[in-house]
Image (spheres, helix red, strand yellow):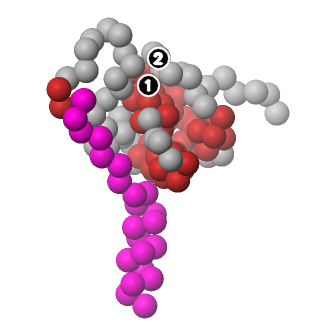
Amino acid sequence: MAKVELATGVVHEVPADLRKALLADKAVLERWQALTPLGRNEFLCWVEDAKQLETRKRRIERTREELLEGKRRPCCWAGCIHRTDKPPSPWAQRVLIDKEPKLKLKAKAKAKAK
């Protein structure tokens, strides 16, 4: 199998764990490749910004989910602070929200209903 050249962001490169997740599903890969460089950069920064491994894993799963939903930026992300073309807004400096993957929330609700 030929090595797939993944499109990157304007600041960040695709890390190995995210690369594996993107390549695992053709639909996810197509949507990733169709994003703008800034859109990809936002997802990359969001994943790399995670301080704990579990948070990073959740963000990778949510990246896959949100791409399949047609989203072009991560939900509830203040934006990449590593870009040098503009300073981060005060809101971007204060707000960082991490939500659980939707699949986990559905599984929790289903288990609770039993």
Q: Mark 1 points at which residue?
A: 41
Q: Residue at x 44, y 35 (%)?
A: 49
**Which residue corresponds to the image point at 42% horizontal and 80% vertical from the top-left?**
110
Q: CA separation, marks 1 and 2? A: 7 Å
Relative to 89, 76 lies left or right: right
Q: Quadrant of residue 106?
A: bottom left
Q: Position of residue 82 (x, y in %)?
A: 39, 19
Placement of 28 over or under 108, stated as above or below = above
Q: Residue furthest bottom?
A: 114
Query: Furthest-right residue in view?
Result: 1
Q: Residue 63 in the image: state x and y as whole percent.
A: 46, 44
Q: Which image quarter: residue 79?
A: top left
Picture coordinates of residue 98 (x, y %)?
35, 49
Pick the front one: 43 or 36: 43
User: Which amino acid does the dot numbered 1 rest on?
Assistant: Asn
Q: Is residue 16 located in the magenta-colored stretch of the structure?
A: no
Residue 48 in view here: yes
The magenta segment is: 93-114
Q: In which quarter of the image is the C terminus?
A: bottom left
Spot occupied by residue 23 in the image (x, y as percentages of width and height): 65, 39
Q: Which of marks 1 and 2 is nearer the N terminus?
A: 2
Q: Could you tell me which residue is drawn at 44 percent across and 25 percent down?
A: 41
The reply to whether dot 1 and dot 2 touch (C-beta < 8 Å) is yes
- The secondary structure that dominates the magenta segment is helix
